[in-house]
Amino acid sequence: MSVQDLQNTLRAKGYDPGAADGQLGPRTFQAFAGYMSDGRAPAGTGALIAQYAPAGELTTRLRLIHFLAQVSHESGFRPIAENLNYSVDGLKQTFSAARISRAQCEALGRAPGRPADQQAIANAVYGGTWGAANLGNTRPGDGWRYRGRGLIQLTGRANYARTGAGYEADPDQVMTPAGSVQCAVDYWRTRGLNAAADADDVARVTRLINGGVLGLAERTALTDRGKAVWPA
């Protein structure tokens, strides 16, 4: 199916891609992102995807469908900051004792009458030897400073630095509309996600994003949703 056919199908679904001109421009991306997220994509999302997609080599049908499906699942195209509001038991169940001691879980986790110390939790689970080796968090406070943010959760000093554009120096930029899209596209390219998308392997794409297959059923359904309006 051509891009023009995609545009006509999106219009029939109630998402306006502008003229059916066969071009993947801002309005078509806005309509496609809106369709993939049930209308949650904020205004301006399409223009930003159109701006940054070429740098991420998001230039084929499968790459774009997988990208839009994963971002829709992760954030609904709205940049979010990681929620570290873990209970004591939640910390113990989520993280190994090598990353946060059981005593730290008891002291930092949410308990009756006491909120979670989210900053200290971030510095514990994303810091230390594990954080330095896996995330490039080598300085005190890096765990909190470089906690997950964006459309696809960008975590760790090394990942913020890899995106360039000043995100290591000012990590809150990842929460801006432009920053969130640029970082998501750059993360996609540098983590080898295009190859996984080319293979049409939703499970592999998912593992490269979150290290496991959390939410795989919805991610697969969203990918199929994209293919339904843009079949091969």
Image: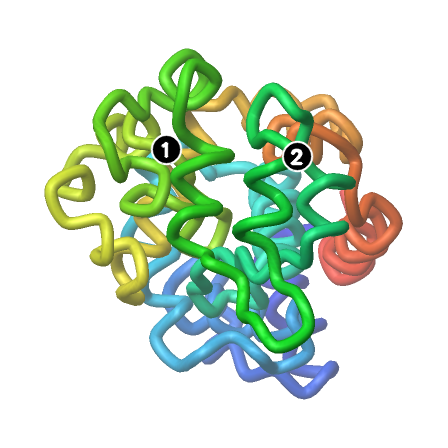
Per the image, label 2 sits on a secondary structure element best described as helix
Up/down of 115 relative to 83, above or below:
below
Name the residue rendered at 62%, 63% in the picture.
110
Which residue corresponds to the image point at 64% horizontal and 52% vertical from the top-left? 2
Mark carried by residue 133: none
Given residues 21 and 120, the one toward you in this image is 120
Q: Quadrant of the C terminus?
A: top right
- Which residue position holds label 2? 102
Choose between 87 and 34: the one closer to the eye.
87
Residue 111, located in which quarter of the rendered image? bottom right
Which sits in the foreground, 208 or 133? 133
Query: Which residue is located at x 34 percent, y 39 percent?
Result: 54
Q: Is residue 31 left or right of residue 231?
A: left
Dot 1 falls on a residue whose secondary structure is loop
Which kind of residue does numbered mark 2 sit on? Arg
Answer with the quarter of the image where residue 158 lies: top left
For the residues marked 1 and 2, what is the alpha-carbon distance in whole angstroms?
A: 23 Å
For residue 13, side relative to residue 155 (left or right): right
Residue in front for this viewpoint, 98 or 75? 98
Q: How is the image coloured?
A: rainbow
Q: Is residue 68 visible?
A: yes
Where is residue 116 drawn, in percent x and y?
Answer: 53, 62
Q: Which of marks 2 and 1 precedes in the sequence?
A: 2
Q: Is residue 23 visible?
A: no
The image position of residue 73, as x and y in percent, is 67, 58
Report the disc number at residue 156. Answer: 1
Q: Residue at x 67, y 87 (%)?
A: 14
Image position of 35 (left or right of 55): right
Left or right side of 48 for 172: left
- Amino acid type for the residue under numbered disc 1: Gly
